[in-house]
Image (cartoon, rainbow, N blue to C red):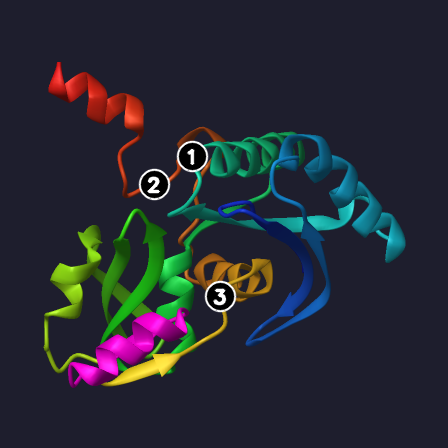
Amino acid sequence: MLLLAADTSGKNGSIALAKCEGENCSVIDLVPLLGGTFSAQLVPQISGLLSKHGFSKGDIAGFAVASGPGSFTGLRVGLAAIKGLAEILGKPIAAVSLLETLAVKSAIQEHVVAILDAGRNELYIGEYQIVGDAMRVIAEKLVPRPEFLQDISRVPVIATEPTIAAELRAAGRQVIEAAPPTSADVAMLGWRKIQLGETVLPEELEANYIRRSDAEILSKTK
């Protein structure tokens, strides 16, 4: 099947086209997206990517999309585009946490913690139990960076920031470094979720921000 994946969670993003059958899923092409203009770029870039490889939107059999954590505006743009296409075509959507993609990339079975830099001296933390293809979410949360770096738990950690990895090693943690996730990673995990039946309807697709918006924080303090 032809799978379209999108990641608009960060300052920059990407879309990927993958051919997936059985246990095999290979990325045909990946197109970067410049941050700040996702709303103007996303649909034309999807159309261009399909045309480049001789496909039309009717050839898409499934979608995978980064649902968070990340930019509030960026995630909304990506989710809205995938919702619209999936609703028109009647195809399944796999919502993918970027923290989950890191946990899977670690290739660690059983207990693993994935870390992404959240800015503001905070970290996005995803804690998972993995057995074979099955993944159980223990927790996904936002943690002050100093607080987590002082934790010397023996659970293996996978991180994308070299400075964070170095600090964790200095604290005695077992650390794996990985490249930041892209839509290619979203496609791979999305395909696994589709195979397991872990899909959502367009109206059920929601962002997993983890961090509350500034507007929410301010409303709570009034």
Q: Distance of mark 3 from mark 2, alpha carbons? A: 17 Å
Marks 1 and 2, Cα distance to the nearest angstrom? Answer: 7 Å
Number of marks in the image?
A: 3
Dot 1 alpha-carbon crowd within 10 angstroms: few under 14, some 14 to 19, many 20 or more: some
Q: Is 129 situated above or below 34? A: below
Quick one: 166 or 94, which is closer to the camera?
Answer: 166
Q: CA distance from mark 3 to mark 1?
A: 18 Å
Furthest residue toward top: 222
Q: Quadrant of residue 99?
A: bottom left
Which secondary structure, mark 2?
loop
Residue 113: image x %, image y %? 24, 70
Residue 72 is tagged as: 1
* Three-letter amino acid code at the position of disc 3: Pro
Q: Residues within 10 Å of mark 3 (few under 14, many from 20)?
A: few
Residue at label 3?
180
Residue 27: x and y, percent?
A: 68, 68
Asked if residue 152 is positioned above or below residue 201 in the image, the reply reads below
Residue range of the region highlighted in magenta in the rendering? 157-173
Does the CB distance between marks 1 and 2 fall below 8 Å? yes
| Mark 1 vs 2, N-terminal side | 1
Residue in the foreground of this view, choosing between 181 and 194: 181
Callouts 3 and 1 close, C-beta under 8 Å: no
> The residue tagged with tag 3: helix, strand or loop?
loop
Residue 11 placement, left or right of 215: right
Is residue 100 shown to the viewer in this render?
A: yes
Give the answer, above or below, for where 101 lies relative to 77: below
What residue sits 61% from the left and 36% below the top?
36
